[in-house]
Amino acid sequence: MKQIDFKFKNINTSTEKKPTLAVVINDVKLLEAEVKTSMSTQFTERSGNNLLQVYFVNKQDSDTITDDQQNIMKDMNFELESVVIDGVDIKELVWGGTYVTAKEKIDSCLFFGPKGHFELQFEMPVLRWTLEQNHLKNGNDPNWQEDYNNYTEAWKRLNQN
Amino acid sequence: MGNRTMALNKAKELAWAIMVDRGMDFDSCRHKMRGFYSRSRSINDEEMKDHVSRIPAVGDLLYDDNIISRFEKSFAGWIQSNDLNSCSGLENFQPDISQGATQAFDSFYLRHRGRKLRIFAGEYLYHIVVAKQLGIEWSFLDSADQLGEDDALILSIPFCDTGNLDNELDQILRTCEDKGVPVLLDCAYYTISKDIHLDVNFKCIDTVTFSLSKTFPIAHARIGMRYTRPEIQDGQKLHSNINYDNRISAGIGLHFIDRFRSDHVYKKYQSLYKAVTDYLELEPSQTIIFAEGDNEWEQYGRRDILQAYGLDHDQSMYRNRICVTELLENEILTRRMIDETN
């Protein structure tokens, strides 16, 4: 089992009702709870591709309060701030996720406003994935693989005995 | 794969294993790896670190009127309590405690501010940075012949770039004597070295400095000793004259020199040092924390330190001085990995 940790911010309510989310990884629901600034759960990893989905479970139209001109006055919403998978903060790679609603898919969206869910593909081991993705994106870390191998070899070596 | 490349790979394996064993995460390991072999710090010896917790209370040190003189008196004897090295003529100098060797450098720059500061290429980089910042005229020299009458020389013994005693030291000092060039001998590494036989009777030597920062894991207490000719008076000496020196540093220093001889570190680690230098095919030096690598070791030389000091010098000016402190202070893991590979 691997740990996944979330940080959320700007958690807003429009009534007494609190926002609730559900965390699903690889089609397995792991957690359903009121949104807090820090949340964690554990999941069974698949080697290679894994799919993270975070559902805004209890959002309804009545949670959005508007004025006569349909300007939003109050709303129940929140934002995803960070994701740490197996101890590795995926940092800006979280922006590779998509927010999916009934009407549209919004790339690079960490805002849970409308009813829908956030989803992000990632690979395990996640450290290797983050290094590779960051280099592919920025082209500034040519030694990532060598350093990753050194690090994992050191781990293996120390844990052999 | 060539033997040298294999040695380099072994060095990488060792470094990564030590860092992972300490519980460092990937990013921290990567960051530390850049300077892993390029530093010059003391061995964080567990036995010595244990003594840190037994240092007398700050209050006791602060109000001990005699602690400075006890430390200064004990220090000379401590320097001589050494089966590996010798230093003759120190009795002709007067001691005063220094905030590391560095304060003595600053005092030397100030007293000789009218002279051109000369250092050999590879010398402690602090001199260059400070000279640039303070607008002190300075330049490298390749040999003693290049010294002029208006120069002042700073020379590390053993030499900072190699960890070895310069074979031409006597010739250098004779030249300085002939030309009236004042000399500061920086002996920061003396107490972690072997086969250093130093005669400080040359009249040109106006300052000899020692430091505990490379010997004991107390570098941040900034404890050094400066020896100057009796006629020399300056700000640092004034502190001594008016009993206004740092008693906490003196107390910490006294605590350590009362318990560990000045050849303790070298003797304790010499067997492991030999195993490490053999394993990594490094050229041993006279200083226990340094060894020299060939060109393949360039990435682990002082590039990182040059960058940290903001110096854009060509790294080929410097030897590939490899600091093995981290390997020595992680003895169990280092020996285990050496044994597994052999």
Image: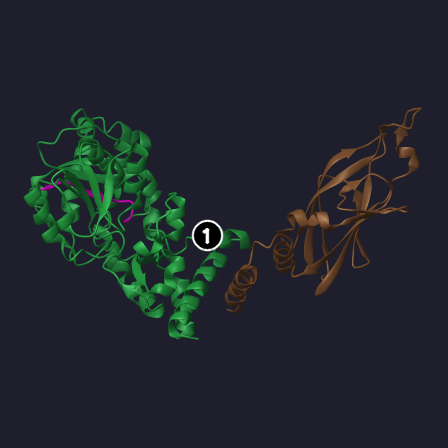
Chain colours: A brown, B green
Q: Chain of mark 1?
A: B
Quarter assignment of residue B340: bottom left
Q: Is residue B212 magenta?
A: yes
**In x, y percent, where is residue B282?**
32, 66
**In x, y percent, where is residue A5?**
69, 48
Q: Is residue A87 left or right of residue B129?
A: right
In front here: B236 or B216? B236
Count of number-bearing discs: 1
Secondary structure beneath label 1? helix
Residue at (87%, 40%) from the top-left corner?
A: A59
Q: Residue furthest right?
A: A68
Q: Is residue B137 left or right of residue B172?
A: right
Q: Eyeballing the image, is B109 above or below B82?
A: above
**In x, y percent, where is residue B86?**
13, 53
Q: Amino acid at mark 1?
A: Lys
Quarter assignment of residue A156: bottom right
Q: Eyeballing the image, is A142 above or below B157?
A: below
Quarter assignment of residue B233: top left
Residue at (48%, 58%) from the top-left corner?
A: B21
Q: Eyeballing the image, is B152 above or below B313?
A: above
Q: Is residue A88 left or right of residue B191?
A: right
In front here: B11 or B122? B122
Residue at (26%, 31%) from the top-left corner?
A: B246
In front here: B256 or B203? B203
Region of the chain picked out in magenta, as a range: B204-215
Q: Is residue B330 visible?
A: no
Residue at (65%, 61%) from the top-left corner?
A: A125
Q: Quadrant of the C terminus of chain B?
A: bottom left
Q: Quadrant of the N terminus of chain B?
A: bottom left
**In x, y percent, where is residue B113?**
20, 32
Q: Which residue is mark 1?
A: B32
